[in-house]
Amino acid sequence: FRDLGEEPAARRIASQLVKQRKSTPFLETMQLAKAIEKIVWRHGRRHPATQVFQALRMEVNDELGALGEGLRELTARLEIGARIAVITFHSLEDRIVKNFFRDRSREWLDRPEWPAPQRNPDCILTLITSKPIEPGEIEQRNNPRSRSAKLRVAEKR
């Protein structure tokens, strides 16, 4: 919950859910959602269980692993001059895409222990967007789900 859902109360939620599960197993998702709501009790724009369910989904589906593998496969198949555009909706996804693009767009690598900078053998991309493109106010008003979207674009060299 802490790593994938970025839930601040992850430890408390996990320990309470384990205790509750020992006495009564969760048979329906609504039972789990209500249990989390009792543990966290805060309400903002989102239900308190949203991040926990997101973390469970991401772990079960190995979404971050699939994203990394997909980026590697796709860039290997791109023709020179072709562009790759990736929209992310979660900070962990965006970090993976940002680092992937960064690591494959740097021409030179430099380490303090090296006598001189070295060419990056993985340099196969040129960044088209140095910063992510985010939805404007009108887009967010027309499509509230877009509020966390970030678009990054790179071109194969």
Image: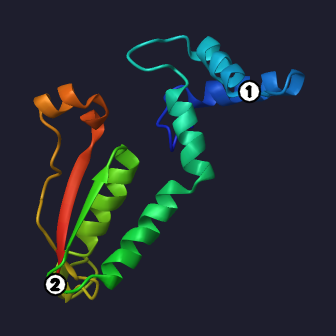
Q: Quarter of the image holding residue 123? A: bottom left
Question: Residue 95, how many percent across, how many down?
Answer: 33, 54
Marks 1 and 2: which is nearer the front? 1
Q: Residue at label 1?
A: 28
Observer-nearest of 86 and 20: 86
Residue shown at 32%/60% (left/top)? 97
* Colouring scheme, one of rainbow, by chain, secondary structure, one colour: rainbow
Q: Residue at label 2?
A: 157
Q: Is residue 63 above or below residue 8?
A: below
Tally of numbered discs: 2
Q: Secondary structure at mark 2?
A: loop
Q: Callout 1, which amino acid?
A: Glu
Dots 1, 2 in contact, CB < 8 A: no
Q: Quarter of the image holding residue 156? A: bottom left
12 displayed left or right of 43: right
Mark with earlier residue (1, 2): 1
Q: Quarter of the image holding residue 124? A: bottom left
Question: Residue 135, how many percent across, how many down?
Answer: 17, 39
